[in-house]
Image: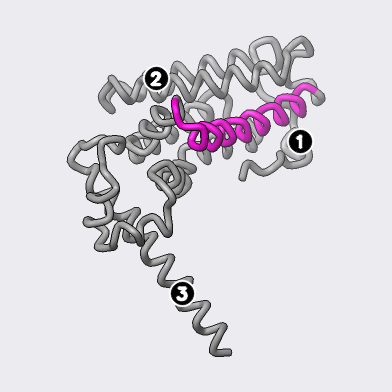
Amino acid sequence: MPSTTRSRAARERRDEVARRVLAAVHALVADGTPYTELPVQRIAEAAGVARSTFYLHFPDKSRLLIALAEQGGQAMFDAAVAWWRGDHSDGPSGVETAMTRMLQEYRANRWVLLALSEVSAYDPDVAAFYHARLTRFTELTRHRLESDQASGAVPPDLDPSTTASVLTWMVERTISMHCRTQPPAADPPLARTLARAIWLTVYAAAPAVPPPGHAERPPAPPTR
C-alpha cells in the first residue's frame, strides 16, 4: 500500500508540473510571441519549475508542442468528424455548420496550430504527429465515402481514397492560410464556400439528400 501511495503521489506531481508548463506557454504566447521564439528557460521560469524538471517531462520543445496540440487542437477536427458521421439530411447547411465550428476552433487554438504547421516542416517528430492526425481524419472520410458509394448516395465514378485526401488537405490548408491573413469577419463567406465545394465534390451527381435509413450503416472507425 505505501508503494502504491507513493506511486500515485509521484504521478500527481508529474501531472501538476505538466499542467503548469502548458499553462505557462499559453500565458507567454498571449502577447503575440511566437511559440518558436520561446526559450525553454523562459517557459520553465514562467511555470515555476527548474529547467531540469522541464526536461524530465518534455525532452524538448517539439514534445511540448505535441502535448499542446493534443490538448487544444483536437476540437477543430471533432467538428468535421461529427459531420462525416452524421446522416447529412440537412444538406449543405450541415457542412457549413461544421466549417464554421472548425474556423472557430482554429482561431481559439491558432498559435498552437500555426506552430504545429510551421515546426512540422523541419522537425520529424512533429511532422509524424501532424501527418498521423491528418491521416486518421482522411481514413475516416474515405470510409464514409465508400459507405455512401455503396448505398448509391455518392457517384460510382468517385474515387474515395483520392477524394478523401483532397478534401482533408483542402480544408486544412485553406483554413490555416485564411486564419493567418484574414480577420474573423471573413470567416462566414469561407465557411459557405468550403461547404459548397465539399458538398458538390461528394454529392453533385447523386441525390441531393442521402436515402432514408442511410444513417443506419456501420459506424466509421475512430479517429483517435
The residues tagged by marks 3 and 2 sit, at their Cα atoms, a distance apart of 48 Å
Q: Which residue is mark 3?
A: 10
Placement of 217 over or under 93, stated as above or below: below
Choose top left, top right, bottom left or bottom right for residue 47.
Answer: bottom left
Residue extent of the magenta highlight: 122-149
Main SS category, magenta section: helix
Secondary structure of residue under mark 2:
helix
Nearer-the-camera pick, 155 or 48: 48
- Total marks shown come to 3
The residues tagged by marks 1 and 2 sit, at their Cα atoms, a distance apart of 31 Å
Query: How far across and down, in percent of the image, does residue 141 sit?
Result: 65, 29
Q: Mark 3 touching mark 1, by CB under 8 A?
A: no
Q: Earlier in the sequence, mark 3 or mark 1?
A: 3
Query: How far across and down, in percent of the image, does residue 167 sit?
Result: 57, 20
Q: Nearer the viewer, mark 3 or mark 1?
A: 3
Residue 213, labelled with which disc?
A: 1
Secondary structure of residue under mark 3:
helix
Q: Which residue is mark 2?
A: 190
Q: Nearer the viewer, mark 1 or mark 2?
A: 2
The residue type indicated by label 1 comes to: Gly
Furthest residue toward front: 52
| Other-residue count near label 3 (Cα within 10 Å), few / some / many at <14 / 14–19 / ≥20 | few
Query: How far across and down, in percent of the image, does residue 219 sit?
Result: 73, 42
Q: Earlier in the sequence, mark 3 or mark 2?
A: 3
The residues tagged by marks 3 and 1 sit, at their Cα atoms, a distance apart of 51 Å
